[in-house]
Amino acid sequence: MSPIVVTAALPYSNDRLHLGHLRSTYIPADIYVRFLRRIGEDVIFICATDEHGTPIALRAEKEGISPKELTDKYHPLIKEELMKMGCSFDIFSRTTEKIHYETTQYFFKKLLEKNYIYEKEIEQLKCPKCGKFLPDRYVEGICPFCGFENARGDACDLCGRYLRPIDLKEPKCAICGTRPEIVTTKHWFFKLTIFQDKIKKWLEENNSIPQNVKNYALNWIKEGLRDWCITRDLNWGVPVPIEEAKGKVIYVWFDAPIGYISSTKILFINKGKPEEWKKYWNGKIIHFIGKDIIYHHAIFWPAMLMGMEEFHPPDSIVAGEYLTLENKKMSKSRGWYIGIDEYLKLFDPDPMRYYLTSVAPLDKDADFSIEDFIRRYNDELADILGNFIHRTLTFIERFFNSIVPEANLLEEDKKLLEKIKEVQEISSKYIKEFRFRDALLEIISLAHEGNRYLNNSAPWIKIKEDPKRAATCLYVCVQLVKALASLLSPFLPFTSEKIWKILNMNSNIHNEPWDIASQLLPSGHKISKSYPLFKKIKSDEISKIRETLLPSKKLEELISIDEFKKVKISIGKIIKAEMIKESKDLISLKIDVGEYGIKSCIAKIGKYYKPEELIGKKVAILLNIQPITIFNIKSEVMLLAAEGENKISLLIPDKEVPQGSDVK
């Protein structure tokens, strides 16, 4: 049996986590690990906080504290919330541990010795006022590809391109706003291009890598990889371990994935087996991540491991897609998200684990809405699962003094009991294929079957007419309850423990073998007193839940009437519309605004409107806005639209008015 390392992406230690992180990474990883333990695999579950990089350094500088103080604040909060949600890590470490520094420096020196790292003089931005270099997010400016004015030095949020600070037009220091100078400095590069064909072959031939990961990574490879600058001019990070690079640190995306290895080392040092970690990193490696870091895990990291030679690339990379909130993208900066801490003020962990797993397949985007969560909670957890379990156990308590009765099985009874074995095997197959939603729904189908069987058998009536038949019915139902307790343990660990305890089982369900689900409770076994597992949410509680969970929008700085009078909003008629070839979502428009003339406009509405359906529409536009240039096209005005329900809706007058009409 080959040992297995399962990792969950290292959360960035500059803020608390939200439901999107749980859905994409931590709950799927925990489900998988809990299942592997149940089937007897030798598995360890590794995670840590990622504590280096410019976002942390920049935020700490703006808050007037050290980066270490910032990460010291968030590491325990992140760890506590993930543990409260049931994440069963073997270790939750930090990338500021001494062993992590040593391991990262070992990687750098080994790859340097093998000539996979080289030095090169490059132009870089330096702030004359702050007196320091400006890597990555320390720079803001205009995207050279699309013209977006608030691009960062590492990426453009509008067109999604990865950038270098030197690429930005009209750059400015993110700290003081000063225009930086271009200076020449020396940095070290990893020869990523050497590994392009190897990575392509590894991706194409590895059937264990989900298709969404393959497609994303292979699309990047088609564009052609570039050598990768892996050093930064910062004083926060792992120091570059060579004399000529004194004062520089290793780029965070070089050091972060090494945190999987350094955390494993720390785990086994703590166990008193300091060399044991090697056995696991020569075994099977499975990474669980969010889709936004596929590039790093499916290209950078495998290339590093290939270059080291003493390691092999990951066996699989499972990437969860995005979770929206009420059909709008979650955003920390806009305050539109639900934090784990806010959720746990109202509910136990398992209802959210259930919802985030069941709402959509992991490789598809999903949405969290309060109404849908409450509906699923009431209909599926309370009415189907909880109700079946509670009715079964209370009937045994009432009619048979809490003793599992004798059974005289008929064909229909045997058929339902055989269903347990079938679900056990099918759900096992699905989990191994990372189809967690399918596995969970298959298990919940047992509760559906149990409810149907219980209702049809009606033991509360049969107990008077045919007590033996009532006894058989409840014998079969309690076997389903036991099976549900076992099979749900990877998904709903706390609920599973509660059911196991009510069944009076003197063991830890998480340590029991997976096939215990189909091993029947003997007649004569005494169960404990039952209680409802899920209390139904009443309609008068919904407003409080919404108020607690959903972030309320706060008005920004108020403006005076005189200031508002400066805003010029008019009605225009769209006379031309066409997609911008370099973008998926941007549409170029020509808008007739009457006496104000024909104005050009770039609008990010390609997901919601086809160019041909826009022509002839009359729309509200903001006229007196500073023009910007995107993809070499001048945009003079801004469309006004309402955002919601996973769509953009243009503001259109409800009566016919001439173009150029002012909006009062």
Image: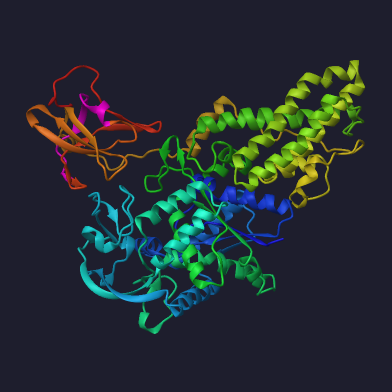
**Location of residue 163 by image quarter:** bottom left
Mark yes or no: residue 492 visible: no
The one of 574 and 471 positioned closer to us in this rendering: 574
**Residue 353 located left or right of residue 550:** right
Count of number-bearing discs: 0
Q: Residue furthest top?
A: 465
Mark yes or no: residue 616 visible: yes
User: For the N terminus, which image quadrant?
Assistant: bottom right
Residue for point 25% across, 28% down: 612
**Location of residue 538 by image quarter:** top right
Q: Position of residue 586 (x, y in %)?
A: 27, 40
Residue for point 81% across, 33% down: 478
Residue for point 36% across, 67% down: 227
Q: Position of residue 419 (x, y in %)?
A: 76, 33
Q: Is residue 617 magenta?
A: yes
Q: Is residue 518 magenta?
A: no
Q: Position of residue 467 (x, y in %)?
A: 91, 21
The one of 476 and 429 positioned closer to us in this rendering: 429
Q: Residue furthest left?
A: 595
| Colour scheme employed for the rendering of this structure | rainbow
Tell me the magenta residue range.
611-628
**Location of residue 622 by image quarter:** top left
Q: Position of residue 349 (x, y in %)?
A: 61, 44
The one of 151 and 167 positioned closer to us in this rendering: 167
**Residue 429 located left or right of residue 411:** left
The one of 213 and 173 positioned closer to us in this rendering: 213
Q: Residue furthest bottom?
A: 243
User: For the C terminus, which image quadrant?
Assistant: top left
